[in-house]
Image (cartoon, helix red, strand yellow):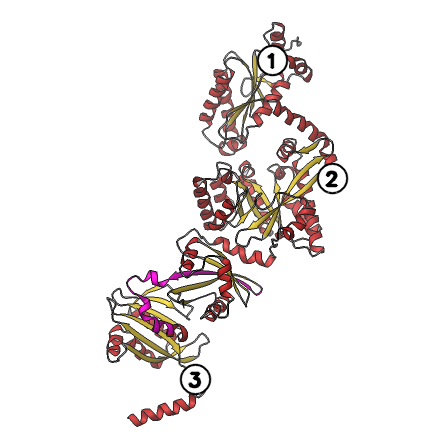
Amino acid sequence: MAAQRENNYDALTGLLEMHSFFHVTIGIADRDHEQGIFPARYAVYFNISNFKLYNSIYGIEGGDECLKKIAAILKDVFAGDYIGRAAGDSFLVLAAKGTAIARTEEACRRINEMINNPGIQIRAGINQTESDDYGKYVQKGDSFTFDLAKIACDSIKDKNNVCYAFYTKEMGKYNEDRNFILAHFEEALKNGNIKIAYQPIVRSITGKFCNSEALSRWYDPEYGNISPAVFIKVLEDAHLIHKLDTFVLREVAKVLRYEIDHDIPYVPISINFSRLDFFLMNPFEEVQKVVKEFDLKPNMIDIEITESTILEDESFLKKEVNDFRNAGYEVWLDDFGSGYSSLNVLADFHFDEIKLDMGFLKNYSESSQRVIKSVIVMAKQLGLHTLAEGVETKEQADFLISIGCDKMQGYYYAKPMGLDIAVDYPQQRQINVETPEEEILFNRASAVNVITDKSIGFYIYDGKYLTIRFANNAYWHVLSKIGLHSKEEVNALLRDPTVNKLESIYDLAEKAKNTGKGSLIYQTDIYYMNINMQKLSQAGNMVLLQLELENLNLRHTNVDLTKYAREIRNFMAMYRDIYYFKGDLGEIEVLQSGNPAYKAGEVMKWEKDVFENYAKDRIHPQDQKRYLHFMNKETIYSLAEKSDKDETVTMFKEKDRNGNYKWMIYDAIVIRDTRGNDVLLAIREDVLPWMADGSEVLQEYTRDISEKK
């Protein structure tokens, strides 16, 4: 039987301090064994997860008061049992076997209700030492059975809906692994038993590899594979994780330097930093040192930080995140959605990208799809890139592409692989590697919300061809009306020189490239399409364009535009601007404009102020009075009535973007069979100056006018 000694009590809680508790409990175990009733009790280990967060909220004194209340609850619930404080926020109970489970559940419930914060939970591990293990129990020392209870408690540390777990032999394997890991870690680093695997990340718009994540793998020739979930946790608990993460950083830098020196296409590689890294070393200074040593650029390495890391010490980590971003590194929030405070983290920190926790796709359903959509929309509003982990099926990939998730990672594309395989993998799979220029182009597209009824497509324009990269459902709905159902069909049409009016689309692309935006009405056999183009980004000669399509035939339900095919066809061929004046509504809709101040689809009031402002800015002073008289709808109606075509034409000197005045022809057609006598107004440059025989025509025209007088 254990020797008798004086017991000591914890000053804060009044419970037995750890060594005294073990002294008492080993004596009880000896007595139970002698009486033949061993095991009659369970070893229960309690621990509060995220208790540092509690201290940060309520202060150290508030934390001490919380620990006192927890001790009081344990004394009340486990009355008659033996209770001790292990250290910090951990407690020990030797509980009677018959009531141990019920009391553990009650204690967890009451303590969690008292704390009242879902991010701060108490959990318990329970161990029952069998009789045939008693010899080992005594040999291992006082704390052995509670060590096993702690292992059980740690196994559910990240499980939100479980308050206790029993120790199992499978958990004993973890203990065995733990001992091996701690004994052989340094040796494994030196001998190359710990290697880096790389898992590709794919950009949704292009299907190209755009990033890679560095992941550590441990294989011992004799012991076999050790799971990262095991050795990373062991190294964190032993405060050795920073040595592993520094090793990963240097290996990544070596790979990038090698790829650059040998002209191998490369992508930025992300590395993970543990919560403890920020307390055991200075990750920012370490990364800066390695980047300088290997002559790399900050945008070649991305920094991943888990949500749980952020919650540990927000004020300190906020500075660390800002240091990385200010130096040119991208900082990603890993496992977004795995904790309780994701939205708070996004509100308080500035990240470049969020990685959606793979749990979103593991339970793939309509409900999870709605959640993912909401996250994507929110991220775009905050200017964040999005990456979905755990993509395993084509159905999941197609869904993520359709809602505008920027990047994807998972077994559907590639498993983590060694460097030798990773280098050849893109060529084997016939998947291209994204260039730095393409990264610049497509990063801008991530800000556009494509979960909308507005038809949106992304195109690359290289100065010669337009190539569609992405289109949302609304865009495909519009294209389906003209028989286009795939990107292959669209690209084939854009490269077909026999397609009518194709040059007008490429002229529009040039305009958008040079001025930032442009619009036109494009006529197919039976439809009129309003096309708006906007430049999103440019890298070298490559431009990323956002296109919005609108089927005018469907929108103008009160006006059948096909009745005016002759007029509109001529307008499209000859006119710079086309405006639709709605007489009954007193509105002007811009259908096509060469003026960057106006965008196709924009609606203005048909009011005097609009024309007065335009006259002051663009019309020659000598023509302004005549211009304002003409742009009155009563004038247009009156002049049109005098013609046999319900049409009136005049000319004004108008200032171009270079500040020069040119004669412009204004052609107004009154559409009599509309309810409000609508007007189509088209504007084009006077053709006379650039006609081959312009001077002769002018002379003939002048002579004819003189004779009529």
Measured from the top left, where is residue 631 in percent x and y? 30, 74
Per the image, the residue denoted by label 3 is: 689
Under mark 3, the amino acid is Pro
Per the image, the residue denoted by label 1 is: 25
Do the residues under discs 3 and 2 have CB atoms within 8 angstroms? Answer: no
Does residue 72 show up magenta in the picture? no
Under mark 1, the amino acid is Thr
Residue 136 visible in the picture: yes
Does 692 sit left or right of 258 as displayed?
A: left
The first of marks 3 and 2 along the sequence is 2
Per the image, label 2 sits on a secondary structure element best described as loop
Residue 351 visible in the picture: no
In this rendering, is residue 215 above or below 461? above
In this rendering, is residue 251 above or below 98? below
Which residues, given as a range, are shown in magenta?
540-569
Q: Which mark is residue 192?
A: 2
Mark 3–mark 1 distance (CA, rounded to whole Å): 107 Å
Per the image, label 1 sits on a secondary structure element best described as helix
Q: Quadrant of the C terminus?
A: bottom left
Q: Quadrant of the N terminus?
A: top right
Residue drawn at x 64%, y 19% as measured from the top left: 144
- Which of pointers 3 and 1 indicates the residue nearer the eye? 3
Per the image, label 3 sits on a secondary structure element best described as helix
Measured from the top left, where is residue 313 in percent x and y? 55, 37
Mark 3–mark 2 distance (CA, rounded to whole Å): 78 Å
Does residue 558 show up magenta in the picture? yes
The first of marks 1 and 2 along the sequence is 1
The first of marks 3 and 1 along the sequence is 1
